[in-house]
Amino acid sequence: MPQKKWPVTFAFVVMILVSGSGVVSAQLSETTSFLANVSNQYRVVPNVVYHVANNYENKLDLYLPADPSGPTPVLMMIHGGGWVQGTKESQVLRLLPYLEKGWAVVNVTYRLVQVSRAPAAVEDCLCALQWIARNAERYNFDIARIVTSGNSAGGHLALTSGMLPPSTGLGRECTAGSFSGPPTIPSVEVAAIINWYGITDVNDVLEGPNTKGYVVQWLGSLSNREEIAELVSPLNYVRKELPPTLTIHGDADPVVPYEHAVRLHAALEDAGVPNELHTVPGGGHGGFNRTETVKIYETIQQFLDRHDLGEGGSTP
């Protein structure tokens, strides 16, 4: 007769009980220790209104080191959802690696298509970036170390936030200043961009064989929709002075064509912009497995280190 095996959990308890004086004890992993203590290391400031348009309040959540030793690097996180759905709250678990680094995180929402069509989402994220600059002293942000990041439509908005020049005029939506005086538009330079499978050529997915319903919704029946699509396409703004850019994309993505990542990488290379393309072989639209995800975050860490952004957080 085969020997009966104890359940793993029961066997583990027995092992602990007989290994010492009979007192149960356990050693927490570094990850568990960090998570158990994160509420002591951070404070959360939720639902800060950073911009109002179309009678809609755009809000962001702040995750701030509780006891910073100096200005902290900032991750501006932007959720995805094809500009037609999604919430900032859905991104919270993606923030944890940056909290462990001691960074401040600004988790942003923006106008979806139900409130306003393109280019509203792009305008809003530029406003969020300007809000960070205006509030740097209040929240101890290091504005020389702002990194934009997002997935899918959020990846597109991370790219536009870091790439669009003032000449597009899309930052004018969030000017500040006195009623009768000249407007003020802070100059905000992004230190790096981490683009998770973002759209880089909007017209490519608006018309033709790669057409996607979410893009058609976002631009709707605008008479100048092709012009707007060109205005908000990151590929149209590639130039030498852009910040270092890391793109993460699965080569079997059915939602955002992998070719968008390849074309962006090639254009940045041609312009001499420091950039990397991390391809997930067989990867779809996110949903990567543990091994793939760990490799991605190793790549992110190496990318940040190479550009002097890996260290400098104020929380161990």
Image (cartoon, helix red, strand yellow):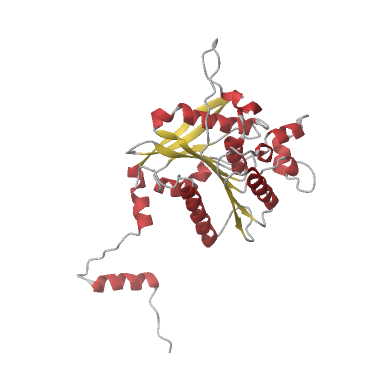
Question: 1 or 122: nearer the eye?
Answer: 122
* Image x and y of residue 116, in percent: 65, 30
Regarding residue 55, the answer to whether it shows in the image is: no
Residue shown at 44% from the left, 36% from the top:
62
Question: 102 or 305: nearer the eye?
Answer: 305
* Image x and y of residue 45, in percent: 42, 34
Q: In the displayed structure, would residue 119 be above or below residue 251?
A: above
* Image x and y of residue 154, in percent: 59, 42
Question: 298 or 41: nearer the eye?
Answer: 298
Q: In the displayed structure, would residue 300 be above or below residue 16?
A: above
Q: Quadrant of residue 20?
A: bottom left
Residue shown at 64% from the left, 48% from the top:
265
Extreme residue toward the bottom, this view: 1
Regarding residue 151, the answer to whether it shows in the image is: yes
Extreme residue toward the top, this view: 180
Quadrant for the N terminus in the image = bottom left
Label tally = 0
In the visual, does 306 lie left or right of 196?
left
Residue shown at 75% from the left, 48% from the top:
210
* Image x and y of residue 287, in percent: 58, 55
